């Protein structure tokens, strides 16, 4: 169970949902503490630490990172130790201890290169982070060379549309932007990074949010203010959703928005953005942190320009305490007097509290997002407890609240729709799945245009579900649409275009001549089977629900769907029965791996295979013979147990 939770938490963290990922990772951590498994505990502590860091809780992340490192070192696991050292190094960078960070990251890089190879994504991660530490220590040339090395490894091993490639491009662009002679190239590298991140992770991922701000900043420097505005708006929306309206990361976007608004002469907008950034930083980082003082200086500049008495008074109130921390301001202070730092901090906190009351974010939106988060958390709990019906109900409610607050085409709904789709597939009631996939495709097309990779990828999901629902001839219109869009997006001449043409040709050839889509979709046929009483199910599977399936894992997590598909093996409908057998094979023997759920399911399938009344018995026995071969070809307790269950299979009729 812990590994399934960690896998889903990692997926959600990579998808840009650190809050949800943290909930699942924390549950895995609690489970690991109760079972006493040090390996699972180390992995869970590491992931909780990562989630806390992404959410801005550096001190909380450090506690978990230290625990994870102690566990991985005691177990002698070089890959895991390298991961923990990398996280510790990032935390040291964040808190400005660059020499310590470099030591940790060099150790991490060496361990990962030895254990995983020089072009593994995790090795590249350590190389990039070491470059960041060196850059901040003043070793600019060495840092840029390391990022260029990392980028070459990414492009060779991972391709252009991989998360690590996008991260490396972003890190390199930051360094190039800081040097006048390489600044023009930084713009192009930032833009490449954004395209790679969206293609690899989706449009709403955390990395995409950061890159939107960076690309916008590059455009502002190039004087392209109009095109930068929409990027910053989208980035702010993503930051507020993922990290909350008062996160230090959200404050960074607000500061960029303030610079953008000031450049356009929109002083009221600049004032609001600087004020919110100042308030967040004063409370999160401290009143005298460098980032807080930067926001205060920007706010003073806008206040002075506005010319009202109220704004001039606020500018003066900020100016006085700033002198205690800023030598530039102190040089202009009358008589060279510098205020007492303790009093200055107190004054800055007072101003931040006042501005915080004046510049609160959209309360209705924040309340709705909080309600959505609460509903999805309850849906997660219901899912993990095996109550799929309640999980689906809560997700539908979350979607409804999100639609009211955000609009029916907001990309924030996609993750909720995806979760509902996964839950519905586990229940076997899939009539809603195809409409959900079509809606996701529509949302992406409306948000980013039909030629965006995400929109085309979503259409591909629609196509495969249409084929599953209506047979090989299903989805032909969608396939033609995808082919047309792909041709418009990348053309026919290049290697990728030619590859796609071959793929589409194979897909067309897989449709038998003269075949027509089934009139009744598979999901409706399945629900008809489930709704009808079946005496054979009652006779042969009376104890099916006595097995704690929610606590048994298969390839995709808790085996909540396995009892449903075992029942459907008794369906008289060939397509329903064949689909369930395919899904059982995919989940219980994925890549010829045996799982705890495989053992329990095999006992029931053996029972069915022994009864001549079972429809499709020949196909069932084919599967059991294959499973017996998998058991015979491996070692370990699960292989031995499966081999014992499937020994002496019944004779064919």
Image: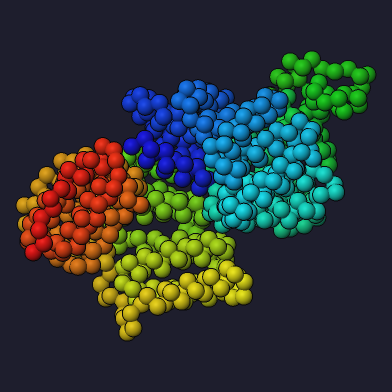
Taking depth in this image into account, of 550 and 433 the one nearest to the observer is 550
Q: Is residue 222 left or right of residue 84?
A: right
Q: Quadrant of residue 35?
A: top left
Please indicate, yes or no, whether residue 278 appears anywhere in the rendered image. no
Which residue is found at the position 67% from the left and 35% from the top?
130
Across and down, in percent, residue 644 comes to: 17, 43
Which residue is found at the position 35% from the left and 48% from the top?
556
How is the model colour-coded?
rainbow
From what the image shows, is residue 243 above or below residue 72? Answer: below
Find the residue positioned furthest to the front. Answer: 633
Q: What quarter of the picture does the N terminus occupy?
A: top left
Across and down, in percent, residue 134 comes to: 73, 33
Q: Is residue 291 left or right of residue 363?
A: right
From what the image shows, is residue 591 above or below residue 437? Answer: above
Which residue is found at the position 39% from the left and 73% from the top?
475
Across and down, in percent, residue 211 comes to: 65, 49
Q: What quarter of the picture does the C terminus occupy?
A: bottom left
Please indicate, yes or no, whether residue 33 appears anywhere in the rendered image. yes
Across and down, in percent, residue 78 comes to: 52, 31
Taking depth in this image into account, of 166 and 120 the one nearest to the observer is 120
Taking depth in this image into account, of 74 and 488 the one nearest to the observer is 74
Q: Is residue 234 left or right of residue 321?
A: left
From what the image shows, is residue 165 above or below residue 294? Answer: below
Find the residue positioned furthest to the right. Answer: 335
């Amino acid at each position: 169970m812990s590994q399934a939770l960690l896998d889903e938490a990692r997926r959600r963290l990579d998808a840009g949902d650190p809050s949800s990922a943290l909930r699942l990772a924390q549950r895995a951590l609690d489970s690991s503490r109760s079972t006493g498994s040090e390996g699972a505990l180390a992995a869970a502590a590491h992931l909780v630490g990562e989630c806390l860091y992404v959410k801005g809780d550096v001190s909380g992340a450090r506690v978990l990172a230290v625990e994870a490192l102690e566990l991985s070192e005691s177990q002698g696991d070089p890959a895991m130790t390298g991961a923990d050292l990398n996280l510790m190094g990032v935390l040291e960078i964040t808190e400005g201890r660059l020499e310590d960070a470099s030591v940790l990251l060099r150790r991490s890089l060496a361990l990962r290169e030895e254990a995983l190879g020089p072009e593994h994504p995790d090795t590249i991660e350590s190389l990039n982070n070491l470059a960041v530490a060196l850059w901040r220590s003043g070793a600019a040339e060495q840092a840029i060379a390391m990022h260029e090395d990392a980028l070459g490894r990414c492009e060779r091993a991972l391709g252009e549309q991989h998360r690590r490639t996008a991260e490396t491009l972003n890190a390199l662009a930051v360094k190039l932007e800081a040097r006048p002679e390489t600044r023009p190239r930084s713009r192009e590298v930032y833009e490449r990074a954004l395209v790679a991140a969206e293609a690899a992770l989706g449009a709403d991922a955390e990395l995409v949010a950061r890159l939107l701000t960076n690309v916008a900043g590059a455009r502002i420097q190039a004087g392209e203010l109009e095109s930068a505005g929409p990027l910053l708006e989208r980035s702010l929306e993503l930051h507020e959703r993922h990290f909350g309206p008062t996160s230090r990361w959200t404050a960074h976007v607000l500061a960029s928005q303030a610079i953008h608004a000031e450049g356009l002469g929109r002083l009221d907008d600049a004032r609001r953005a600087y004020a919110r950034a100042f308030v967040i930083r004063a409370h999160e980082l401290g009143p005298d942190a460098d980032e807080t003082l930067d926001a205060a200086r920007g706010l003073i500049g806008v206040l002075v320009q506005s010319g009202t008495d109220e704004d001039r008074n606020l500018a003066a109130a900020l100016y006085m305490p700033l002198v205690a921390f800023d030598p530039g301001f102190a040089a202009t202070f009358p008589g060279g007097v510098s205020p007492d730092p303790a009093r200055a901090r107190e004054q800055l906190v007072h101003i931040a509290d006042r501005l915080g009351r004046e510049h609160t974010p959209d309360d209705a939106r924040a309340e709705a997002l909080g309600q959505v988060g609460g509903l999805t958390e309850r849906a997660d709990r219901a899912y993990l407890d095996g109550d799929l019906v309640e999980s689906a109900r809560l997700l539908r409610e979350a979607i409804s609240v999100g639609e009211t607050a955000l609009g029916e085409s907001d990309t924030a709904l996609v993750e909720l729709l995806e979760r509902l789709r996964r839950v519905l597939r586990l229940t076997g009631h899939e009539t809603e799945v195809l409409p959900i996939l079509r809606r996701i495709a529509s949302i992406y097309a409306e948000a980013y245009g039909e030629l965006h990779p995400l929109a085309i990828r979503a259409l591909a999901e629609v196509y495969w579900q249409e084929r599953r629902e209506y047979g090989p001839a299903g989805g032909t219109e969608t396939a033609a649409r995808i082919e047309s869009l792909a041709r418009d997006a990348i053309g026919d001449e290049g290697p990728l275009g030619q590859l796609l043409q071959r793929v589409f040709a194979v897909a067309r050839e897989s449709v038998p001549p003269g075949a027509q889509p089934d009139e009744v979709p598979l999901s409706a046929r399945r629900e008809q089977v489930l709704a009808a009483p079946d005496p054979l199910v009652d006779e042969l599977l009376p104890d099916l629900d006595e097995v704690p399936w929610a606590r048994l894992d298969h390839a995709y997590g808790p085996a909540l769907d396995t009892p449903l598909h075992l029942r459907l093996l008794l369906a008289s409908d060939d397509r329903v029965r064949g689909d369930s057998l395919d899904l059982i094979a995919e989940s219980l023997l994925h890549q010829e791996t045996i799982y705890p759920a495989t053992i329990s399911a095999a006992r029931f399938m053996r029972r069915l295979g022994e009864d001549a009344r079972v429809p499709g018995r020949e196909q069932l026995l084919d599967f059991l013979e294959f499973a017996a071969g998998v058991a015979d070809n491996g070692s370990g307790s699960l292989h031995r147990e499966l081999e014992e269950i499937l020994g002496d299979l019944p004779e064919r009729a």
